[in-house]
Image: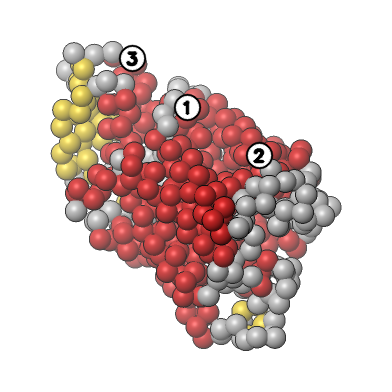
Amino acid sequence: MNKVTNFFSSRWGMIGTGVFIGIVAALLQKWGNPGNMGVCVACFERDIAGALGLHRADIVQYMRPEIIGFVLGSLIAAYLFREFSARGGSAPIVRFVLGVFAMIGALVFLGCPWRALLRLAGGDWNAIFGILGLAAGVGVGTLFLRTGYDLGRSQKTQTIMGWIFPLIMLGFLVLTFVFPQITGQDKNGVLFYSMKGPGSMHAPLVISLVAGLAIGFIAQRSRFCTMGALRDLILFKQAHLFFGIVALVVAAFLTNLILGQFHPGFDGQPVSHTMGLWNFGGMVLAGLAFALAGGCPGRQLFLAGEGDSDAAIFVLGMIVGAAIAHNFGLASSPKGVGPYGVAGVIIGLLVCLFIGFAFRKKTA
Amino acid sequence: MASTIDARGLSCPQPVIMTMSEMARTGTGDIVILVDTDTSKENVMRAATGKEWNVAGVDRDGEGYRITISRV
């Protein structure tokens, strides 16, 4: 087992993870997921918030099995390799707030870092502004890290505590089997289902779930992280994680070419808008929030699967952030930013800067 | 006398930042780093070898690991 561990944490293990995610994401789009959204952690958590009725934007409501799979796949890997470790207590309320604003920033851009990469691989050049914003936000985050920013230590805790979030995900999975989608109905029992828009577009449930489990498994092993990729490059000049995101983009691009899913341009791209400044600004906010929380939204799910309840709190923050963004007009649409999107980004940046300054240790 | 860094309970990238700054401060000698996750163990070892330090030993230490790195 040790050998496998070493392989996934090697450079080729990281590249293999990126290639796998890139190919699977492009295929998930082929099998039904929305354009350039084979996998999007932010969008899919937003769809889950919608499926639960936390927001009522009727085009983005679906209990995405990929997210459930990410957490449970990571849980399985963590148990197989004896890495499951229930821990928590490192500034949970701060992580919740960071999750809320990370999601607001991502929904102004319309995608998490994973989707930014997939949009690029699909020819959506608006993503370039988003990726530049992400790098800028992470860059600001590294300035805080350099000057002693630290949310404090987590503590070992009872094993069951680490199970709470995976059990919530398992509960969501049970709900989808008890209240499956019925053609022509926007609701079954307690779950909402979009009849139009991105929420209505999805790969078959079992395929989505298996893809999520597989990605969750190998991402737990390799520690794949899109935010860390930029952070480590800026902070340590270390490219280990960066190879993973480059591999993802190249693999998704080639798969898109083969499947006829590569459509270069700015206008008319799926689930995107062309306001460059706010594509940039939204991702500055998201990147800063991810950097201050120590992981991209995918990584937070994998950490939550291996027992980190602080990461779980961040994810819950993101789900609540999605509800806020769609209930109060912060989220963008293909027409552009929402009426309160710009205000949301500015407030979010101020809050993140406050957190960054407030949590610096005096002697760093 | 090896200096010891206790990075247990700290999340990414704190263990690496602490290791990096200690390597820069001492330049040579032994450094012991305590971590509590496999991810931190891998990251610290990668940071050390990247700066041409040797990983002299990795031992189980309670729930975590005790990593010794050295440079002459």
Front in this rendered view, residue A55 or A187: A187
Write the residue at 31% across / 47% down.
A8
Disc 2 to disc 1, C-alpha distance = 22 Å
Q: Is residue B54 above or below residue A166?
A: above
Q: Quadrant of the C terminus of chain A?
A: top left
Write the residue at 61% across / 57% down.
A261
Which one is closest to the eye, mark 2 or mark 1?
Answer: 2
Residue A110 position, x and y percent, is 68, 52
Query: Mark on residue B25?
Result: 3
Write the residue at 51% across / 86% down.
A178
Q: Confirm whether circles 1 and 3 share one chain.
A: no
Residue A86 position, x and y percent, is 34, 56
Judge left or right: residue A16 versus residue A178.
left
The residue that disc 2 covers is: A128
Disc 2 to disc 3, C-alpha distance = 39 Å
Judge left or right: residue A134 versus residue A215.
right
Write the residue at 41% across / 59% down.
A216
Residue B67 quadrant:
top left
> 10 Å neighbourhood of mark 1: few (<14), some, or many (≥20)?
some
Q: Amino acid at mark 2?
A: Ile
The residue that disc 1 covers is: A235
Q: Secondary structure at mark 1?
A: helix
Judge left or right: residue A309 versus residue A269.
left
Disc 1 to disc 3, C-alpha distance = 17 Å
Residue A17 position, x and y percent, is 39, 49
Q: Confirm whether circles 2 and 1 share one chain.
A: yes
Q: Secondary structure at mark 2?
A: helix
Q: Chain of mark 3?
A: B
Q: Amino acid at mark 3?
A: Arg
Q: Chain of mark 1?
A: A
Mark 2 or mark 1: whose residue is earlier in sequence:
2
